[in-house]
Image (spheres, rainbow, N blue to C red):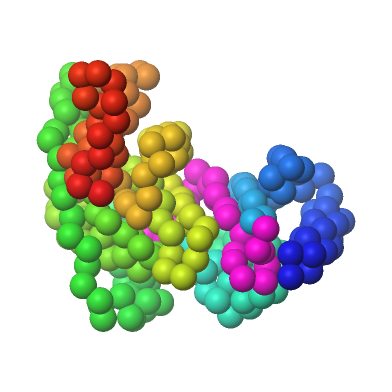
Amino acid sequence: MAEDNSDSQNDEIEALSAIYGLDFHTESVEHKSYSIEIEEGELTSLLQVTMPPDYPRTSPPIYMLSAPWLKGFKRLELCGYLEEIYLENAGESIIYMWVERIRQFMVEHGEVNEQETHDDQIATCLASVNLEDETDDLSPCPEIFSGEIISDRKSHFQPHLAAVKSQTHVRQVLRKLYENKKVANATHNMYAFRFVPEGSSNINQNCEDDGEIHAGSRLLHLLQILDAKDVLVVVTRWYGGIHLGPDRFKHINNAARQILVSCGFVGTRDDKGKKNKKGK
């Protein structure tokens, strides 16, 4: 079985390299990590994939999608399409299908009227998510915890956290947060999540900047170095009109770390430097 996976992976890598040419990059031969640049009109995306040993027979590739134009629920909508492709083609090589679905989504996005108001964008995203994922409402939304607000020069940062085990949980939590008008009208709602789906040993993870460039990836990196799993962290920022420079990332990470610790997803250290676990 392992040999079959390896042969399939090598065949897929060779095909992707031939199809995408200079847009296909090898990030790590040892870890079988690759990236593909996707351009459509004025939009660009970068799909980074890592092939675990049991791909494609029993698990999907691990991926990260970098796309500055892709925000909020639109990102979740696209991730849902990628998940559907995997479920419909379980056991098969799917990276080419993912790339072309992303390209199709970029074309569709370019045809959307960019003059919608922020409230209309939220309503549209909610409607599209509900249409595509009618089963979301069949299970209860995970409980959401909100942390203390960090304030600096009229900007305010508040973290939110929920335990998640699926993309459905992520969508439910984000929809619930956006029902709060104060959160929905915030300047940025950057987030990151990591979870291990039921019946799998692979981590599903992704992030969103929501206009605060690099904030989502930094949040995801924080979850990775803390080895936090089965959790979604959202940091809401209300901009006060004064640029904070790099301090804004410090506040975002501190807010996220604060709520991860308080909710028991991250260990603490006692006075002797020994690690303690809280809650989980």
**At 22% across and 63% down in the image, what residue appears?**
142
Observer-nearest of 277 and 62: 277
Q: Which image quarter is the N terminus in?
A: bottom right
Q: In which quarter of the image is residue 28?
A: top right
Is 72 covered by the magenta stretch?
A: yes
Task: Tell me if residue 147 can be seen.
Answer: yes
- In the rendered image, residue 181 lying in the magenta stretch gets the answer no
Can residue 80 be seen in this snapshot? no
At x 35% / y 55%, what residue is drawn? 230
Quarter where residue 30 is shown = top right
Give the number of marks: 0
Name the side, left or right, on which 188 lies relative to 15. Answer: left
Along the viewing direction, whichever of 63 and 32 lies nearer the viewer: 32
When the figure is inspected, residue 235 is found, relative to residue 96, above or below; the finding is: above
In the image, taking residue 53 as reference, residue 86 lies left or right, namely left
Q: Residue at x 37, y 19 (%)?
A: 246
Q: Where residue 134 sits: x, y (%)?
A: 33, 81
Q: Give percent across and percent down for residue 128.
A: 37, 72
Residue 243 at x, y = what percent?
Answer: 30, 20
Is 263 above or below relative to 162?
above
Q: What stretch is highlighted in magenta?
A: 53-78
Vertical placement of residue 148 versus 232, above or below: above
Please give left or right for residue 127 compared with residue 3 in the image.
left
Pick the residue in front: 228 or 277. 277
On the image, which quarter does residue 270 sit in? top left
Q: Give the image location of residue 97, x and y in percent.
A: 67, 68
94 shown above or below 64: below
Q: Which of 118/93 is in front? A: 93
Left or right of residue 50, residue 246 in this image: left
Which residue is depicted at the point 21% across and 41% down?
278
